[in-house]
Amino acid sequence: MNSPEIEWLCSPGLTPYPEALAEMERRAGAIQAGSEPELVWLLEHPPLYTAGTSADPAELFNPENLPVYEAGRGGRYTYHGPGQRVGYVMLDLNRRGRDVRHFVHSLEGWLITALGELGVDAYRAPGRIGIWVDHLGTEAKIGAIGVRVRRWVTMHGFSVNVSPELSHFSGIVPCGIAEFPVTSLGQLGVGQADIGFDLALEHGLGSFLSALGGD
C-alpha cells in the first residue's frame, strides 16, 4: 500500500538492526521536514536484544551471547529475531494529534484487531503494556510496544511473535515482566500466520489512521 499519504513497506529476509535504526532516524527527519511520506515498515531482524531507555542490566542474562543494541525507544529489554514481525511506524503527530498516549492506545487496538482476524482473542492488560492472550491457563504476551517520539514524529513501534524461537526470550526479562510467559501465533496453532498477519495489518491500516484522527 503506497500513496502520497503513507508508504507501506515489507522488507524480505533479515534486516540488520543498526541499518534499520539508521534508516528510521533518517526517514523520521525527512518526514518532519516534509520531504518524504509517513511510513509503516514491516521487517524481521537476526536474533538480538534491544535495550530501551529504562533497561535494567540485572534483567539481561544472555546465555547465548546475542548482540545487544541501545534502541533509544522507551521501555526495557526486548528480543527480536526470525519469525517475529517488527513494525516500525513513522507518523507525523503534528498532523494526527500531539497525543502520545492516544497513539500507543491506537497502535494496540490495530494489533488486537489484526490478531482477531486470525482468530486470536488478544487484549490489553491493565498496568502491563503490550498485547496479551490466554494460553495454557495463564496470560501470555504475544506482542510488545515500544515507541519514541522526536519533534512529534513517531519511531519504533511494535513486535508480534509469529513463529520465533521462544527460548531466546529466556535471555532477558521481557519488557521487565517476569511473572508471565511469552507465546506466538505458531504456538497458538495459527496456520500461515506469517502471511495472514501482514494482510490483516494492511486491512486495518485505514481504521488505525482514522482512530488517530487529524488530517
Image (cartoon, rainbow, N blue to C red):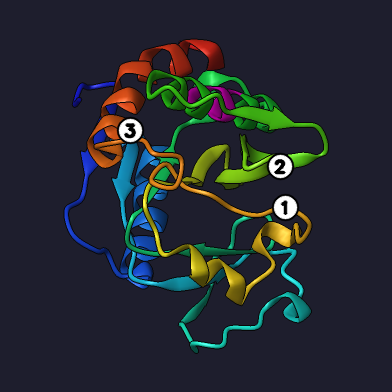
| First reached walking from the N terminus: tag 3 or tag 1 | 1
The disc at residue 180 is: 1
Residue, disc 2 = 138
| Quarter of the image where one finds residue 60 | bottom right
Residue, disc 3 = 197
> In the figure, is residue 166 to the left or right of 118?
right
Amino acid type, mark 2 = Thr
| First reached walking from the N terminus: tag 2 or tag 3 | 2
> In the figure, is residue 64 to the left or right of 101?
left
Q: Nearer the viewer, mark 3 or mark 1?
A: 1
Closer-to-camera residue (94/56) = 56
Tell me if residue 36 comes above or below residue 70 in the rendering: above
Closer-to-camera residue (129/170) = 170
Amino acid type, mark 1 = Phe
Q: Is residue 41 visible?
A: yes
* Label 2: element kind: strand
Q: Is residue 213 visible?
A: no
Q: Quadrant of the C terminus?
A: top left
User: Disc count in the image?
Assistant: 3
| First reached walking from the N terminus: tag 2 or tag 1 | 2
Percent of width and height locating residue 6: 30, 26
* Label 1: element kind: loop
Percent of width and height locating residue 31: 38, 39
- Magenta stretch contains residue 13: no
